[in-house]
Amino acid sequence: MKKILIVMIFITFLSNISYGQVVNKDEYSEARALVIKANDPTEKNGERIQLVKLKILEGKYENKIVKVKHIIGEETTLVREVKKGDRVILSIDKRDKIVNIYISNYGRREYVYYISIIFILLLLVIGKKKGIKSTISLGLTILAIFKILLPAILKGYNPIFITVAMCSFITIITMFMVGGINYKSISAIIGTIVGIIIGGSIAIIVGNKGHVTGMSSESASMLMFIPQEVEFNFKYILFSGIIMGALGAIMDVGMSIASSVEEVYKANKETSHRKLFLSGMNVGKDVMGTMSNTLILAYVGSNIPLLLLLMAHGNTVPNILDLELIVVEIIRALSGSIGLIMTIPITAFAASFLICKEK
């Protein structure tokens, strides 16, 4: 427990470091609001306009009642027609001493909280003691990403170096908390970190050979205009995302192999190093196919609209494979799968060697 507290204090300390300029809050801010009343939309000059009465729920204008002309379908808004009881995000523009308020988005965080609570409750009820450890390690992982990894990249540090270091940190904390400080966890850590490095290295090599720029997504392009004025290496940011995206599946495989080797050893403590290694490999072969499919299907599933759009316009498969946006996803899926596959023999060897050494 003391170790967990030390890690949390360390993360809290780093989270208080300043990471550059922020948007001037005197000119622009956002606030959540509750829709009290929403009139039916009316047509005016080709636009659908809705008069909306709102109660601001936070910030400088908390509890203030405002009336807003909501233009439905306007390019500057991400919402459609709103209804009474909806929670929305208001954009408040205070430049030139004129306060302009308009609806910019729906408020969705409550539903994120609900599903998160359900997830944590199931983790605690079914996992019990290990569920508690898993919850704590998950919390530390989220804190590390949002309080250390992303701010450090935003400050201009090398994304690949920071991501590898953070992945190693997350792996060590998670494995030791879930599996305990023992040879099983150490084996899983070795296999996971080496697998991540192999998968990441392949992604970097193939990406460089394929002249990947890292600018294929809209969000990457928008990073050029952030107020911090950081000169990003977008290719490195892309590779760091690939490494981070593969971590979960590779960590899962690493712990599965190490646990299976330990169970075989517990069943027969006279089992040789070779037999323990082969047992781990046999389990790994079964896990390998399903986990590789998991990575590939996850990336394909997130890009179905794009693939449909390309095919609808008559693009052939060879033409599609020349597009950077598609190549990036293929590299992401396959490099992660290669890292996952390499984790199996590495973890099996490490686990069988260390457990035999313990005997």
Image: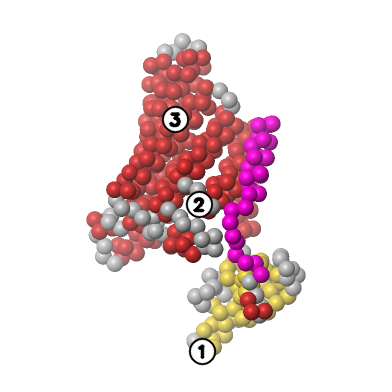
Q: The residue tagged with tag 3: helix, strand or loop?
A: helix
Closer to viewer: mark 1 or mark 2 = 2
Closer to viewer: mark 3 or mark 2 = 2
The answer to whether residue 324 is above or below residue 182 is below
Classify mark 1: residues with Cα within 10 Å, few (<14), some (14-19) or many (20+). few
Number of marks in the rendered image: 3
The answer to whether residue 177 is above or below residue 145 is above
Residue 156: which numbered mark, if any? 2
Residue 246: % across, % down? 44, 42
- Disc 3 marks a residue whose amino acid type is Gly
Residue 53: % across, % down? 68, 77
The answer to whether residue 110 is above or below residue 63 is above
First reached walking from the N terminus: tag 1 or tag 2:
1
Which range is magenta? 1-26
Q: Which residue is mark 3?
A: 191
Taking the magenta stretch, the answer to whether it contains residue 192 is no
Residue 102: % across, % down? 61, 75
